[in-house]
């Protein structure tokens, strides 16, 4: 098999959608009948021309993909991310040969197993047992090959009791478990997985991700994985392709792609100086001047490896001298809005009017793989009054950790699975043999 297993060149996909005009007030019966007749005639023309039937009085072309080109090497695990409607699922449908591109071409070497929707490739009237063999035949496997892996598939899916029941009677979770088990165990050369894993429960998702990690790291399969769970993306994928409005806007390291993803809506990655509005009240105590996340060379960063330390630096001005001592502190939140920790800082004994800078060092192997936002706060107390500033989600950072780093020490200690939790410190472990 060649080193490049997927090669897409100039892929574009356009859809024609219809809009039905609202009935005009006072529309006559004759006008209504003529409108219906015109719509019916258009459907006949579309059918005879082999075009998809589009219902409506006016039509519009929308572009789901625009000139998309990329290649994927053998054994690569590539994440595909982007906002809803960015074109991710359309791309996977083209790669899976479910739909044809409007322009461009794609070359694929090897067997492809797709899991784009619940039960992709299943026949609802057939039993679970029959669908396992059907999917094996679609992938080009012999009956003997499927039989050899049959018990593993059934054990993974946990549907033994319902194996001879038509899958149309399965629950969504059962359908999902069996569909993924078949796709993962029949050993395709390329596994294409959409966000469908979100259907399963937490334990099932963990099992599926573990299976994909095993397939990628130990068996050298190529995986294309679409997900909105950025912690999973940074853990499973070394390379990520970011889509926006049908175009590839970034193709590179997972952490950098996730950082770009969080910055798409303009709410993330504020790493430059602050210039707040002039003080509205005379008794305001402090103003934030600047904030940044940096490495130890002073470079502003938007993503960092979990094994490296970094620092949060912000400067501010005390607008008056005060009797009490101010407290600078940061609050760190993960992508789900959970508070990872709060760290109060130090301040000189005398709080005189003027500019100050506070730096907080965050050690390596503390935060888990995820995207984080950081609040910058200064608490001031003077003559019984409390004030200061609190800038919510002032800074953003992606902490990345690939399962390929498991053998390099750190907090994983050789473990290659997904690790839960907001923080993941490298603690001191000792194991000895008991006689």
Image (cartoon, rainbow, N blue to C red):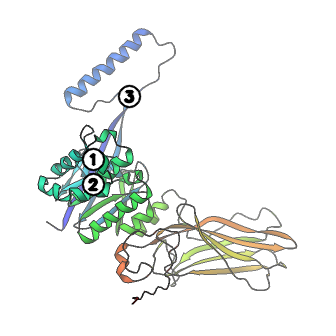
Question: Which residue corresponds to mark 3?
Answer: 58
Query: Position of 429 compared to 129: left or right?
Result: right
Depth order, front residue of 72/300: 72
Front in this rendered view, residue 395 or 135: 135
Mark 1 nearby-residue class (10 Å; few <14, some 14–19, many ≥20): some
Give the label on residue 163, or none: 1
Where residue 163 sits in the image (x, y, percent)? Answer: 27, 47
- Tell me if 318 is positioned left or right of 406 in this view: right
The span from disc 3 to disc 2 (Cα, nearest Å) is 50 Å
Instruction: Compare marks 1 and 3 and give the one earlier in the sequence.
Output: 3
Residue bearing the label numbered 2: 154
Residue 299, horizontal then vertical, whole percent: 50, 79
Q: Is residue 190 left or right of residue 377?
A: left
In the image, residue 301 sits, relative to residue 177, either above or below, namely: below
Q: Nearer the viewer, residue 121 or 128?
A: 128
Residue shown at 31% from the left, 54% from the top: 157
Q: Quadrant of residue 407?
A: bottom left
- Spot occupied by residue 377 in the image (x, y as percentages of width and height): 68, 70
Residue that extends furthest to the right in the rendered view of this protein: 383
User: Label 1's element?
Assistant: loop
Assign a secondary structure to mark 2: helix
Query: Dot 2: within a 10 Å radius of its alpha carbon, few (fewer than 14), some, or many (20 or more) residues?
Result: many
């Amino acid at each position: 098999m060649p080193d490049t297993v997927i090669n897409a060149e100039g892929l574009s996909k356009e859809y024609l959608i219809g809009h039905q005009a609202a009935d005009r007030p006072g529309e006559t019966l004759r006008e209504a009948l003529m409108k219906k007749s015109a719509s019916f005639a258009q459907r006949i023309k579309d059918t005879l021309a082999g075009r998809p039937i589009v219902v409506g009085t006016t039509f519009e072309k929308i572009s789901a993909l625009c000139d998309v080109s990329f290649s994927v090497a053998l054994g690569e695990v590539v994440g595909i991310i982007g906002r809803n409607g960015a074109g991710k699922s359309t791309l996977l449908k083209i790669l899976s040969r479910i739909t044809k591109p409007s322009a461009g071409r794609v070359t694929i070497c090897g067997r492809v197993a797709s899991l784009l929707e619940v039960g992709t490739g299943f026949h609802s009237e057939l039993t679970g047992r029959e669908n396992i063999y059907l999917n094996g035949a679609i992938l080009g496997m012999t009956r003997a090959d499927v039989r050899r892996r049959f018990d593993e598939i059934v054990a993974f899916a946990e549907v033994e009791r319902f194996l001879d029941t038509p899958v149309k009677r399965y629950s969504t979770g059962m359908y999902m478990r069996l569909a993924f088990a078949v796709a993962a165990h029949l050993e395709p050369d390329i596994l294409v997985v959409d966000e469908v894993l979100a259907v399963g429960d937490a334990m099932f998702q963990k099992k599926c991700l573990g299976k994909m990690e095993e397939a990628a790291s130990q068996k050298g399969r190529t995986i294309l994985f679409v997900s909105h769970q950025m912690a999973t993306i940074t853990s499973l994928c070394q390379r990520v392709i970011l889509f926006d409005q049908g175009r590839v806007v970034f193709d590179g390291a997972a952490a950098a792609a996730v950082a770009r993803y969080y910055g798409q809506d303009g709410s993330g990655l504020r790493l430059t100086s602050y210039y707040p509005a002039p003080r509205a009240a005379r008794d305001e105590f402090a103003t934030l001047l600047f904030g940044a996340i940096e490495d130890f060379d002073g470079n502003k960063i938007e993503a960092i490896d979990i094994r490296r330390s970094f620092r949060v630096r912000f400067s501010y001005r005390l607008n008056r001298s005060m009797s009490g001592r101010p407290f600078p502190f940061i609050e760190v939140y993960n992508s789900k809005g959970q508070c990872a920790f709060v760290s109060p800082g130090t301040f000189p004994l005398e709080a005189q009017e003027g500019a100050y800078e506070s730096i907080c060092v965050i050690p390596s192997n503390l935060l888990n793989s995820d995207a984080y936002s950081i609040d910058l706060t200064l608490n001031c107390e003077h003559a019984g009054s409390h004030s200061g500033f609190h800038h919510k989600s002032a800074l953003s950072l992606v902490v990345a950790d690939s399962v390929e780093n498991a053998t390099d020490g750190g907090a994983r200690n050789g473990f290659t699975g997904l690790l839960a939790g907001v923080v993941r410190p490298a603690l001191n472990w000792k194991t000895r043999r008991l006689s």
